[in-house]
Image: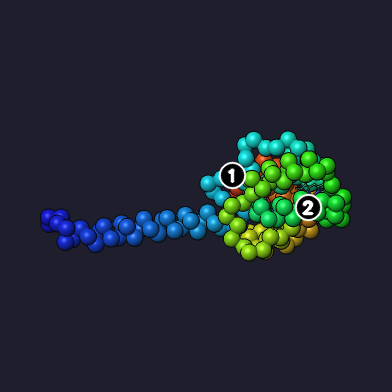
């Protein structure tokens, strides 16, 4: 059978359709959770030294791409009353760190809210539901709080939360 435009068009249409499907699947995957942007790492290769130093003394320095710019501004405006502690900085340090966080914040935040906590975001709850994390794991003394990302994400300090680097504590 000769391929003429008459019987080629359904093939073309199918190919275009398949391509469209692939693209929308990739987009859906890329937007899977608000803190993620596959085109941009959660944490840039070059990090701000002050952020690294000041924001890692009580917990890991949380990757900027985990929250929206609005959330980071709120966190940085309230450091004197930071989750029951005083984490205030000089205004110069505060500005420098805020600039770093805002510049590298998630630019794909789909939720309309700007929670103060990464762990309060809808994407976080769905990624960490009972199917993904058996409830008993949260009781493990190595975990203590959902904010202890590094208890399960072995490369959390490098801003890497990929599935291959997850190891649930025993
Ligand atoms: C003096 C100690 C201290 C310092 C310094 C500190 N934090 Fe925190 N931070 C805390 C505590 C305590 C919590 C609550 C942790 C928990 O819920 O387990 C917290 C929680 C957070 C959370 C929410 C985590 C979640 O549950 O999703 C963010 C975001 C955060 N800190 C950002 C920062 C940033 C940015 C800096 C640097 C400017 C910083 N912190 C410096 C003590 C500190
Ligand atoms: C008790 C263990 C545990 C803790 C603590 C934890 N996570 Fe997770 N996280 C998981 C598991 C399990 C998954 C699901 C992986 C999957 O989809 O198969 C996950 C998924 C994720 C994903 C999606 C990864 C992907 O590529 O699909 C991100 C991002 C993430 N966690 C960030 C965080 C952050 C940020 C913190 C700390 C604020 C944190 N997690 C704390 C266990 C944990």
Distance in Å between CA atoms under marks 2 and 1: 25 Å
Q: Is mark 1 within 8 Å of ligand 2?
A: no
Which type of secondary structure does the marked residue at label 1 adopt? Answer: loop
Q: Earlier in the sequence, mark 2 or mark 1?
A: 1
Q: Is residue 29 left or right of residue 3?
A: right
Q: Which mark is residue 41?
A: 1
Q: Circle 2 is placed at which residue position?
A: 77
What's the coloring here?
Answer: rainbow
From where the camera sits, is residue 102 visible?
Answer: yes
Residue 27 lies, with reference to residue 162, above or below; the image says below
Task: Relative to 14, say whether 41 is above or below.
Answer: above
Q: Nearer the viewer, residue 109 or 62?
A: 109
Do residues under tags 2 and 1 come within 8 Å of each other at their CB atoms? no
Q: Residue at x 15, y 55 (%)?
A: 3
- SS state under label 2: helix
Tell me which corner region of the image, top left, top right, bottom left or bottom right, holds residue 9.
Answer: bottom left
Could you tell whether 13 is left or right of 141 in the image?
A: left
Position of residue 138 relative to residue 48, above or below, is below
| Few, some or many residues within 10 Å of mark 2 (<14, 14–19, 20+) | some
């Amino acid at each position: 059978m000769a391929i003429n435009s008459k019987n080629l068009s359904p093939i073309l249409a199918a190919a275009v359709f398949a391509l469209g499907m692939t693209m929308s699947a990739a987009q859906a995957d890329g937007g899977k959770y608000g803190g993620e942007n596959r085109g941009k790492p959660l944490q840039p290769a070059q990090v701000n030294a002050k952020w690294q130093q000041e924001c890692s003394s009580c917990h890991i320095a949380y990757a900027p791409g985990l929250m929206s710019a609005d959330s980071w501004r709120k966190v940085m405006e309230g450091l004197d009353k930071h989750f029951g502690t005083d984490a205030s900085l000089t205004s110069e340090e505060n500005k420098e760190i805020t600039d770093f966080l805002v510049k590298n914040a998630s630019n794909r935040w789909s939720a309309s809210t700007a929670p103060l906590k990464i762990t309060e975001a809808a994407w976080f709850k769905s990624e960490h539901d009972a199917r993904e994390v058996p409830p008993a794991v949260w009781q493990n003394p190595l975990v203590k709080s959902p904010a202890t990302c590094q208890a399960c994400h072995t490369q959390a300090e490098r801003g890497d939360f990929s599935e291959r680097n997850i190891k649930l504590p025993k």
